[in-house]
Image (cartoon, helix red, strand yellow):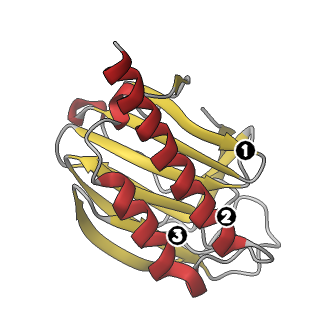
Amino acid sequence: MSEKIDRLHDAAEAVRACAKEIGDCMKGTDDPVPHKARIVAAIERLLRRDDLREIGSPRKTSHANGSWILYYDPKLMIVLGDRRNDMGDTDPHNHGAWIATSVYAGQVRYRSYARTDDRKTAGKAQLQLSEDRILNAGEVALSGAVPHDIHQVNRLSDTYNLMIVTGGYLPGTREYYDVENGTYEVRPAD
């Protein structure tokens, strides 16, 4: 029994080390881009562990079959989500904070968008595709800072995603975008 507890403690320590590295990068800024290499390296180290599915506190979500909070503080949250391929795709959406999306197991198509309008007209939004790529196990993508935190993740197989959200919280609503029509609607967040 103590062997298992020691292993789970090591996993929790690795999650805390990742959170500390990201927190150190983000001191005094809301933009992850200048620190992208360091943030990605910290997350990649965490993704190499095979025991992350054994730790965490369950959380409710509508974008996954299961979701567990691995780390939380007022400035950062690390979540592991179990997303089955038969769930369908999500629309492009924001979180109100920059986000790192990574694949622990499986494969996803990841797209991120920059918001190019002046944000003055409610329900209207012009987006420009910033990134469109396939993420495999162990790979990481970073969104831009708000308002360029818009992203879409489409599962290509049953997948475990590791998601890192700055701000340490998920706001009560999100904007879901219709890229073709240049519109968005506000919906409750999960």
Between marks 2 and 1, how big is the CA–CA gap?
10 Å
Mark 3–mark 1 contact, CB under 8 Å? no
Mark 2–mark 1 contact, CB under 8 Å? yes
> Callout 1 environment at 10 Å: few (<14), some (14 to 19), or many (20+)?
few
Dot 1 falls on a residue whose secondary structure is strand
Q: Quadrant of the N terminus?
A: top left
> Callout 3 environment at 10 Å: few (<14), some (14 to 19), or many (20+)?
many
Q: In which quarter of the image is the C terminus?
A: top right
Q: Nearer the viewer, mark 3 or mark 2?
A: 2
Dot 3 falls on a residue whose secondary structure is loop
- What residue sits 71% from the left and 42% below the top? 173
Query: Residue 34 — which label?
Result: none
Which residue is more in the foreground, 53 or 174? 53
Which residue is more in the foreground, 97 or 167? 167
The amino acid sitting under disc 2 is Gly
In this figure, which residue is indicated by the disc labeled 3?
Answer: 143
Between marks 3 and 2, how big is the CA–CA gap?
16 Å
